[in-house]
Each structure stands twice: as C-alpha cells, then as structure tokens.
C-alpha cells in the first residue's frame, strides 16, 4: 500500500476548500442578482419609464420619378420595337440632363396578348311588326387581335432643381403614368442617428426632472425601445401633387420643401 505524505494531503484539502469557497461565493452572488431582478420586476415602483422624441429636418437632395411606356401592335416584335423607340428617346433625353446610367432603372418589362370577344353573325329575323328582332345564335369567342408591350422605368434625379423640366420633357415624349416627384434624402442614416440621439437626450432630461420631483435617484437603464425613424415630407406644392399628369404645360420649378426625420424612444430606468 502506497503511503501519501501528510503535506500533500494538507495541500489537497486546502485546494478543495478554496474551490468550495469560490463556488459558494459565485452561487451567493447569482442568487442575490436573481433576487434583485425578481424584486425589480415584481415591484413597479422600483423603475420609471419615460418617452423621448427627436426630429431633424433637411432639404431633399434627390427626386424619384417613375414612368411607363406602353405600345400595342399586331405582333410582339412590332410592340417591343415601338416601346424601344420611346425608351431610346427617353434615355437620350435623360442623359442630356446629366442623369447617370446608375440612376436609371428598369423596374418591369413584359408583353401581353390582347383579345376581343367577337359574337358570331346571326341571321336576321323579322318580327310580326316588320321590325328586326334581336337574336342570339351562340358561337361567340375570344379572338387574338394583337399584343401590348410594357416597360416601367424609375429615375433618380440628383439635381432636384431640374425636376420640373425633366418631367415636362418626359411627358412630351409620350410616356404614360408619369408619377412623382417623390422628394427624398439620399443618405438618411446620419439624420436618423441624430434624430434618435435627440430622442434619447429628450428622454434623459424628462427622467431627471421626474426623478427630482419624486425624490428618487436614477439607476441603470433596464430597457430601451426604439420606435423607428420615419421620413416625413413637411411640404408639398400644388405642382408636385399634379405631377402625375402625362403632359405638363410648363417647366416651372417644383418647390421641394423639407423632409423631417423623426424618432421616438422608450427608456426604463431603475430608481433607488
């Protein structure tokens, strides 16, 4: 039988005892933390919730325009060629207005058959009063009469001051369903971040005032909610609202107003 030295056994006992002490402290801290969380959740008066609002306004730096090109013909090829002619004229016009290719996008392109319902010619029947009487002899059917080619294009105009002139030019080229302009901000991330920061600052100020009125001290933030940032146009001109008409009588400037980015947050603070 191997005899274990007493010094070795004592070191082993000390190591085990130290491990048990550390483990006991860990579980004690864990239990205390869970108890505090339970207490905070169970007692509503241990926290306060405030709401903050922030908003940032900026002049739009882009205008989005959408238009369609529709043509009908006896064959698919003829319909597509007719669309291609208008499309080329529109693209040449846009490039002449310094619109880059990356800002012109085909959203949809398709062609569809066109049918007409044609009734079979029935023999004429004369009634007793000598008047032709309506008759139905059946045999009607759908008849293919041609094809419609369709293309939808979206354009981003970076020189917003030229929006009215560009829309008039597109209308004169014979495009259909000319819609816009939708004024927007090309890069909203910076404005959204600023609006959210303003909303948080607003909530913190309200929390400090409320805690002072209640006679309590603010603790750590328990929860945070961001209701999002919403770009909202602050002003639309009459010209802008009527811009969907296919032809504009003039190329008058379209007032772009300002867009507002807003943010609403909810913050819950622990109170002591």
Image: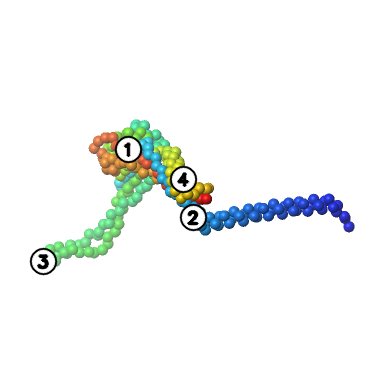
Q: Are marks 3 and 1 in contact (CB under 8 Å)?
A: no
Q: Residue furthest left?
A: 129
x and y percentages locating residue 94 in the rendered image: 34, 35
Q: According to the image, label 1 marks what residue?
A: 256
Distance from disc 2 to disc 3, alpha carbons, whole Å, reads 95 Å
Q: According to the image, label 2 marks what residue?
A: 45
Distance from disc 1 to disc 2, alpha carbons, whole Å, reads 49 Å
Residue 104's disc number: none
Give whichever of 6, 133 is nearer the camera: 6
Q: Are marks 1 and 2 in contact (CB under 8 Å)?
A: no
Taking the image as shown, residue 27 lies to the left or right of residue 72, namely right
Distance from disc 4 to disc 2, alpha carbons, whole Å, reads 16 Å
* Residue at the spot 49% in from the left edge and 49% down from the top edge: 216
Q: Residue furthest right?
A: 1
Which mark is nearer the camera, 1 or 4? 4
Earlier sequence position, callout 1 versus callout 4: 4
Taking the image as shown, residue 138 lies to the left or right of residue 64, namely left
Earlier sequence position, callout 1 versus callout 2: 2
Are there few (<14), some (14-19), or many (20+) residues within 10 Å of tag 3?
Answer: few
Q: Secondary structure at mark 2?
A: helix
Q: According to the image, label 3 marks what residue?
A: 129
x and y percentages locating residue 68 in the rendered image: 33, 43
Distance from disc 3 to disc 1, alpha carbons, whole Å, reads 70 Å
Earlier sequence position, callout 2 versus callout 3: 2
Q: Are marks 1 and 4 in contact (CB under 8 Å)?
A: no
Are there few (<14), some (14-19), or many (20+) residues within 10 Å of tag 1?
Answer: many
Q: According to the image, label 4 marks what residue?
A: 208
Q: Residue furthest front?
A: 215
């Amino acid at each position: 039988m191997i005899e274990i030295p007493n010094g070795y056994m004592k070191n082993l006992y000390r190591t085990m005892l130290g491990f048990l002490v550390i483990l006991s402290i860990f579980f004690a801290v864990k239990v205390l933390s869970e108890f505090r969380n339970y207490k905070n959740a169970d007692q509503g008066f241990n926290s306060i919730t405030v709401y903050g609002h922030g908003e940032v306004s900026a002049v739009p730096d882009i205008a989005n325009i959408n238009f369609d090109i529709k043509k009908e013909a006896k064959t698919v090829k003829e319909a597509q060629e007719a669309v291609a002619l208008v499309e080329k004229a529109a693209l040449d016009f846009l490039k002449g207005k310094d619109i880059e290719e990356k800002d012109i996008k085909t959203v949809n392109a398709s062609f569809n058959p066109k049918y007409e319902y044609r009734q079979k010619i029935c023999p004429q029947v004369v009634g007793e009063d000598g008047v032709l009487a309506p008759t139905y002899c059946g045999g009607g059917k759908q008849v293919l009469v041609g094809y419609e080619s369709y293309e939808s294009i979206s354009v981003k105009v970076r020189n917003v001051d030229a929006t009215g002139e560009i829309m008039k030019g597109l209308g004169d080229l014979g495009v259909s369903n000319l819609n816009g302009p939708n004024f927007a901000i090309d890069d909203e991330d910076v404005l959204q971040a600023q609006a959210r920061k303003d909303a948080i600052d607003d909530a913190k100020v309200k929390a400090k005032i409320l805690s002072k009125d209640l006679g309590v001290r603010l603790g750590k933030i328990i929860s945070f909610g961001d209701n999002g940032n919403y770009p909202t146009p602050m002003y639309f001109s009459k010209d802008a609202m009527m811009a969907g008409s296919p032809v504009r009588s003039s190329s008058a400037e379209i007032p772009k107003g300002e867009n507002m980015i807003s943010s609403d947050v909810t913050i819950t603070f622990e109170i002591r």
